[in-house]
Amino acid sequence: DVKVTQSSRYLVKRTGEKVFLECVQDMDHENMFWYRQDPGLGLRLIYFSYDVKMKEKGDIPEGYSVSREKKERFSLILESASTNQTSMYLCASSSAGGPNQPQHFGDGTRLSIL
Amino acid sequence: EDQVTQSPEALRLQEGESSSLNCSYTVSGLRGLFWYRQDPGKGPEFLFTLYSAGEEKEKERLKATLTKKESFLHITAPKPEDSATYLCAGNMEYGNKLVFGAGTILRVKS
């Protein structure tokens, strides 16, 4: 089974802090994704990556950056955390075998910015 | 703008009471429609991919169908363990990006 592991289940940070969310997958998947999930809004794509050192903006990239130095690891960075970034963050991965390869998700990091 | 809309927002069923969840989409050039199940405190778990109108897929008490404008997730004789949030997502014409609906919260009471 594919396993996507997010480093923290719960995280509390203060406004203005630099925050790192880490995600590791163990299936040698080429594609990795970061979403945020808010009630009533569904999952919204922040950034995604098709390969090491490659990244593309999703629908809501403002205030975020990403890093992919190794194939299995994809990090989401909040450069200067703000209260409107309080949310559930979900990481996912998929293989490059075509557009309909399912994305496999981690269990999320619930981030609170105070 | 690509959109995926799910209805109803919430559904309460008695055990054994069959029903359907709806997912309508305006994703241009849909290349695939995905259904996921999400339990509280967990990430979404993949259920089905549907590729073309008329296609159907089944898994236990769940059956997903696809038309040119919408998809249905039929739940036959549900059990309390089927309680979860069900998400659908459309794969845009270009790339591997998914557009998600807001989900349907299903509660099945015994």
Image: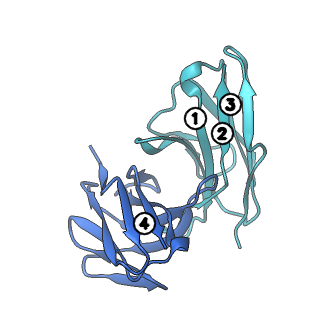
Is label 2 in a helix, a strand or a loop? Answer: strand
Tell me if residue B104 can be seen.
yes
Q: Secondary structure at mark 3?
A: strand
Of the pair A11 and B31, the residue shown nearer to us:
A11
Q: CA distance from mark 3 to mark 2?
A: 14 Å
Mark 1: which amino acid? Answer: Ser
Chain shown in blue:
B
Q: Is residue A18 left or right of residue B15?
A: right
Residue named by callout 3:
A77
Image point 49% across, 85% down: which residue?
Answer: B60
What amino acid is found at the position of numbered circle 2 in the picture? Arg
**How many numbered marks are there?**
4
Label 2 or label 1, whichever comes before in sequence order: 1
Figure chain in cyan: A
Q: Do dots 2 and 1 share one subunit?
A: yes
Characterize the local packing of mark 1: few (<14), some (14-19) or many (20 or more) Cα atoms within 10 angstroms: some
* On-image quarter of the C terminus of chain A: top right
Marks 3 and 2: which is nearer the front? 2
Q: Chain of mark 4?
A: B
- Identify residue type, mark 4: Phe
Q: Residue furthest left?
A: B68
Label 1 near label 2: C-beta < 8 Å? yes
